Image: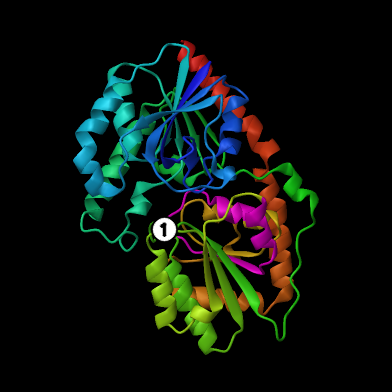
Amino acid sequence: MDLVFVTEARFHRSVDGKVYSQNGSYGLSLWERYLSVFDKISVLARVENTNKDFPKEYIAESEKVSFIEIPYFVGPLEYLKKRNTVNKVLKNLAFNDETVIICRVPGKIGTIFTKHLRMKNRPYAVEVVGDPWDVFAPGTIKHFLSPIFRIQGYLNLKKTVAHASATLYVNKNQLKSRYPSNKEAYTTNASNVFIPDSSFNDPPKKFRKKEKELIKLIAIGSLAQMYKAPDIVLKTLKELKTKRYKLHLTWLGDGIYKKPMLELANSLGISNIVDFKGNIPTGEPVRKELKEADLFIHVSRTEGLPRAMVEAMSVGLPCIGTKVGGIPELLEEKALIKPDDVEGLLIKIVEFISNPELMNSQGLRNYKEAKEYSDSVLRNRRQEFCREIIKRSAK
């Protein structure tokens, strides 16, 4: 049985003719999860031809993984220009009965494609990885059409999920309660985090109070949008510096807002204690950065279930997060703040770094919790999801 995997992720065909993931998160390690059940995968996604070089770890195709390319676009304006072409391509796609379809939603591509599938009475499954109601909440995206996108995205996702034959949610409760599946659908939850079992061979790191050394904060998140609230983190860091706390922030992730955030750091007078490193390969390079840090900060304005936070927890880092999406399913109340709360983040950081016992108890607690997201635990759940889709597709 073959799989068609539909995603909003963007890919790039480099000068070597091969397709690469934009940041490595949609590389071969992701497809291996599905190839344990399916024979081959066709990825339905946007692919851009480019002259850029990418790390070999970012490669996204193989003998068993190919791409069905649709017109490349970024953002609402480019989509509107290519909407008719995109719609035509998706409408005319046809697959035999030996093909299963999984759409990772929300997003324009999944919304349009599932609409055509419903018209053809073709069953499909969905992986729900985000919430447009939160993504387009006031203050999250600066666009005059955000209120319309919010309502439209919410209604589209509800309909997409309601007609799916099987649904996988990336968190346990929040997405399921807002976007319920139909009574006949198979429903489960499994994070899209990939934490190898070997990651837990090392004991959780321990924090020791540093009288003269810098305390190292780390944050991970795309800067393609302002979802991860880097502005809030920088403003908090400014206040902490003013109060003479010795801190340094490393931010992993890239995007169009990197330059504005560098400018903001400079205007706040904290550029010397902030390092925006851009994208680095997933896996061990990220774990190395996490192991060198003391405290993980993830104050998203919207969230599914953050992969980066689970990775930080898996090395035994204490974490601070916001009360959005699936974050409260990962952290205790004592580690949570409201979104867009500079004062709350400042107080919480001081509370943590001033108390080594709290740092270490939270780090150990997070390490144990992260084991629930190890590959061996989630693999069985995902495989059962895929097998159930095959059963339902055969009916």
Image coords of residue 377 (percent x, y): 68, 37
Q: Position of residue 272 (x, y in %)?
A: 53, 81
Q: For this rendering, which residue is in front, 63 or 220?
A: 63
Tell me the SS state at disc 1.
Answer: loop
Q: Which residues are magenta?
A: 284-311
Tell me what residue is drawn at x 64 percent, y 33 percent.
379
Query: Is 76 situated above or below 41?
Result: below
23 and 309: which is toward the camera = 23
Vertical arrangement, residue 347 with respect to residue 62, above or below: below
Res. 386 in view: yes
Residue 296 part of the magenta segment? yes
Count of numbered circles on the image? 1
Where is residue 36, by image quadrant? top right
* Percent x, y of residue 376: 70, 36
Whole-percent x, y for residue 391 in the image: 52, 15
Tell me how the rendering is colored: rainbow
Residue linked to disc 1: 255
Q: Residues within 10 Å of mark 1 (few under 14, many from 20)?
A: some
- Residue at point 30%, 43% (across, down): 73
Q: Amino acid at mark 1?
A: Gly
Is any atom of residue 340 visible in this view? no
- Give the quarter of the image for residue 106: top left
Judging depth in this view, the residue of 7 and 395 nearest the camera is 7
Q: Is residue 132 above or below residue 85?
A: below
Q: Is residue 210 magenta?
A: no
Instruction: Identify the residue shown where x is 31% and y is 39%.
Output: 108
Q: Is residue 96 left or right of residue 358?
A: left
